[in-house]
Image (cartoon, rainbow, N blue to C red):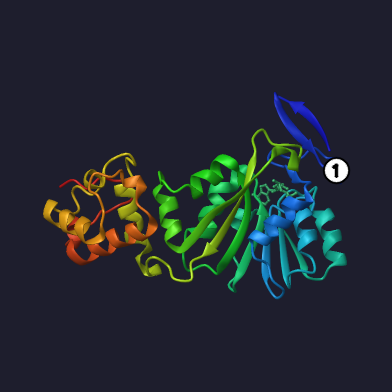
Amino acid sequence: MTVKKQSGRTRAKSPQTGAHAPRGQHFLVNRDAIDRLIDAAGVRPGDTVLDLGAGTGAITRSLAGRAANIIAVENDPALIPVLRRLAAAEPAICVMARDMLELTLPQRPFRVAANLPFACTTAMLRRLLGQPATQLVQAGLMLEKGAALGLTQSELARAEVLVWRMWFELAYERTIPRASFSPPPRVDAALVRITRRPQPELPPGERARFARLAAHALRAPAQTLEQALHGIFTPPQLARMARQHGLDRRQPVRTLHTREWARVFLAMREHVPPHRHPRSTGKRNRR
Ligand SMILES: C[S@@+](CC[C@H](N)C(=O)[O-])C[C@H]1O[C@@H](n2cnc3c(N)ncnc32)[C@H](O)[C@@H]1O
């Protein structure tokens, strides 16, 4: 792998094609990290597995023989011939030369084993986790370490991540040092395991209403539970709800666990009239 500075930025040169690749191409060169990624996705024979941003096929190649259908998605035209050569030797591999953000997700249960380009991480997570009705079963994702911590730490600052967690468990598996990639990124990466909850915290049909509550309540994550729910629950409703579920009204709202969020939501649905429910994502209730 060679690198060349252009306008102060480091650009990778593909080992297979010799062409200078777009930024964000950090190819996995650590065998152990690839195996752990595939293990985190829980891949079994018979599975359909997406490798999103397949690059030169480091993960795709390792999936061969371990899954029934391997879909390698890549949008760099210089890398497609490399992947097609792999597919010619292994019938389970199917190459899709396209933007992963425009991919139609499989309509049958599927897994993801991917070293995502950092620039696509949030948009791709939205596609994978944003709708509980997708067929995603489990994923092992290599992410930038900061992004991995933001998804998995117990205290929550982002409403969107809270919503995802109602249907998926997000677990930090391990830090993956920069040296596991070629060329190495500027910061370490981390492996995250995503598993669909067998029993979701809320019915999928409640996604939109829960997302509005989460956005309202986490607009300032350091606020107390009482401040966060002001304008939704009346003070007596809040006191009763906190007592029933063993919550402290003065605890920072970001410290609630997913199960507690589900209880708060269900209490709102049961006891708070709909005109007091948060209306649109990100906007304060004016009451
Ligand atoms: C971090 S590299 C991972 C490559 C390979 N999976 C590996 O681990 O060695 C990310 C790959 O995603 C590709 N990529 C970037 N944006 C993409 C997009 N929007 N759609 C599909 N592939 C994309 C890049 O060309 C690059 O090959």
In-image side of 223 versus 151 (left or right):
left
Closer to the camera, 173 or 216?
173
Q: Amino acid at mark 1?
A: Pro
Q: Residue at x 18, y 61 (%)?
A: 272
Q: Is residue 253 above or below residue 1?
A: below
In-image side of 149 versus 68 (left or right):
left
Q: Residue at x 26, y 43 (%)?
A: 224
Q: Residue at x 55, y 46 (%)?
A: 148
Expressed as whole percent of the image width and height from the top left, the position of residue 174 reads 62, 48
Q: Secondary structure at mark 1?
A: loop
Q: Is residue 145 above or below residue 256?
A: above
Q: Quadrant of residue 14?
A: top right
Instruction: Provide the residue designation for mark 1.
Output: 15
Confirm whether residue 165 shows in the render. yes
In-image side of 286 versus 70 (left or right):
left
Residue behind label 1 places its C-beta within 8 angstroms of ligand 1: no
Confirm whether residue 97 shows in the render. no
Expressed as whole percent of the image width and height from the top left, the position of residue 131 reads 47, 62
The quarter in which the N terminus is drawn is top right
Expressed as whole percent of the image width and height from the top left, the position of residue 239 reads 16, 54
Expressed as whole percent of the image width and height from the top left, the position of residue 127 reads 53, 57
Residue pushed farthest left? 236
